[in-house]
């Protein structure tokens, strides 16, 4: 018998102990397990829904531990308790049933002593009234909003400064919704119409988007990622905002394109498709493992015009390229809906180092470009520092070009007394406004 909660807790343990995302941890945790797709979907839901609410769940557990801290608990045990709390407070499972199933698993895995602790904690958790956090509203509004909308306090403060309280709350609410699924047709292997028909035959209902090769999934019986044509590379799962990036770059079949942070390669594969597998894409990444996986994926997608380079994107030099894509590592603050774990991993020191890397790639793009060449700089972040601030930095070397808001809105004009004069030439997307990842896209010309 497979306990969905137990497998989900094992996956959450992987998320806790590594830097893997929920999706990567699910791949690792479910590897070699022959599970029905419905059971896989259930495990997937447990992992994402528990991780999404991690702060409020830990708040409840911390109130129910006597003389212990949640960080001191065994990682698997801790995540089993989290799942029990999620079930009784957010999944509408009867508290007695939620407690019983978790205690059974704990007893089998850890013995009577921890089973007794699990039982005590979950019985106390049943009595916690979440309406009590309303009392925080007056004395600590940031903490109140953080717990109510399942976001870290630093993000609540930042989002309010950036967007105002009303918009910040809408953004956080959207981050808690089920992520929108978009399908990009891979025209190297299939036509747009053939993929549409295939999806309909497999009971996947889709609707058109402003990008002709991208569909938004409305409903499905079986996840599109589990269908044969996905495995065969005839379509990929790619967010709408992410797919817009290649269109802004506008690659041509005879061009040399440099992608300075390429793996896992979704954008590179889209660029290759728009180039009809002609010209050349130089894909740079500093991880041998990511490049290896990218090569394997590109083979499935039928991409043949990529040259792979294991190198540092801030230093790699080839020169004479027509266009550069810089889609660098970032805080991923626009991707909380897709990767809830990112919310709980923010590190100020690492954040500042990442901004240095982003700027290093922008400067390196300038060195590699031909005169008149184009740089597209994009992130899946909502922060001003990684977006408008870096675009302002780039404007020292480049002429800022206009990005048409096919999807999205214009940039932020002012933040913390800092002005961004090119706000009306860049594009931002937000989960609460556009039902996609929060992205920033800008375009520059070397003159």
Image (cartoon, grey):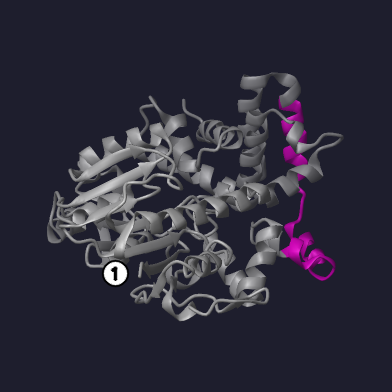
Q: Is residue 278 visible?
A: yes
The secondary structure that most of the magenta stretch takes on is helix
Q: On screen, 277 above or below 109?
A: below
Q: Is residue 308 left or right of residue 351?
A: left
Q: Position of residue 150 (x, y in %)?
A: 64, 57
Range shown magenta? 115-144
Name the residue at 55% across, 32% down: 14
Count of all numbered marks drawn on residues in the image: 1
Name the residue at 20% across, 45% down: 303
Of 182 and 206, nearer the camera is 182
Q: For mark 1, what is the residue?
A: 209
Of 130 and 215, nearer the camera is 215
Name the residue at 24% across, 45% down: 230
Tell me if mark 1 has few (under 14), some (14-19) or many (20+) residues whose alpha carbon lies within 10 angstroms of its own: some
Residue 106 magenta: no
Q: Position of residue 352 (x, y in %)?
A: 62, 53
Q: Quadrant of residue 40?
A: top left
Q: On screen, 208 above or below 39?
A: below
Of 137 and 270, nearer the camera is 270
Q: Is residue 221 visible?
A: no
Label 1: element kind: loop
Q: Quadrant of residue 38?
A: top left
Q: Position of residue 325 (x, y in %)?
A: 36, 57
């Amino acid at each position: 018998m497979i306990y969905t909660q137990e497998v989900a807790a094992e996956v959450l343990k992987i998320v806790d102990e590594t830097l893997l995302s929920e999706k990567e941890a699910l791949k690792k945790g479910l590897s070699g397990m022959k599970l029905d797709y419905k059971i896989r979907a259930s495990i997937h839901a447990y992992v994402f829904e528990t991780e999404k609410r991690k702060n409020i769940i830990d708040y409840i557990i911390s109130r129910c531990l006597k003389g212990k801290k949640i960080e001191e608990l065994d990682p698997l045990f801790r995540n089993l308790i989290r799942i029990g709390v999620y079930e009784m407070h957010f999944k509408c499972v009867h508290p007695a049933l939620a407690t019983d199933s978790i205690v059974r698993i704990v007893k089998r895995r850890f013995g009577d002593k921890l089973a007794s602790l699990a039982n005590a904690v979950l019985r106390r958790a049943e009595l916690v009234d979440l309406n009590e956090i309303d009392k925080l509203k007056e004395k600590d509004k940031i903490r109140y909003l953080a717990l109510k909308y399942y976001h870290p306090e630093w993000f609540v403060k930042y989002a309010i400064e950036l967007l105002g309280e009303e918009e910040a709350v809408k953004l956080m609410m959207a981050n808690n919704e089920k992520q929108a699924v978009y399908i990009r047709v891979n025209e190297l292997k299939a036509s747009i119409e053939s993929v549409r028909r295939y999806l309909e035959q497999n009971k996947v209902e889709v609707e058109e988007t402003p990008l002709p090769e991208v569909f938004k999934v409305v409903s499905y019986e079986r996840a599109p990622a589990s269908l044969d044509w996905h495995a065969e590379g005839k379509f990929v799962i790619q967010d709408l905002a992410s797919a817009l990036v290649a269109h802004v770059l506008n690659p041509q079949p005879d061009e040399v394109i440099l992608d300075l942070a390429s793996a896992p390669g979704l954008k590179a594969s889209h660029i290759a498709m728009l180039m009809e597998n002609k010209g050349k894409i130089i894909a740079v990444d500093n991880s041998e493992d990511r490049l290896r996986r990218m090569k394997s994926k590109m083979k499935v997608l039928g991409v043949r015009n990529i040259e792979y380079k294991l190198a540092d994107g801030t230093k790699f030099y080839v020169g004479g390229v027509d266009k550069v894509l810089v889609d660098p590592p970032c805080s991923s603050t626009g991707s909380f809906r897709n990767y809830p774990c990112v919310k709980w991993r923010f590190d100020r020191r690492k954040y500042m180092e990442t901004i240095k890397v982003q700027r290093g790639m922008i400067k390196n793009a300038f060195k590699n470009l031909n005169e008149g060449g184009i740089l597209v700089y994009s992130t899946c972040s909502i922060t001003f520092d990684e977006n408008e601030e870096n675009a302002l930095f780039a404007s020292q070397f480049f002429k800022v070009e206009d990005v048409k808001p096919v999807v999205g809105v214009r940039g932020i004009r002012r933040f913390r007394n800092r002005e961004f004069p090119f706000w009306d030439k860049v594009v931002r997307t937000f989960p609460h406004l556009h039902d996609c990842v929060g992205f920033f896209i800008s375009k520059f010309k070397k003159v």
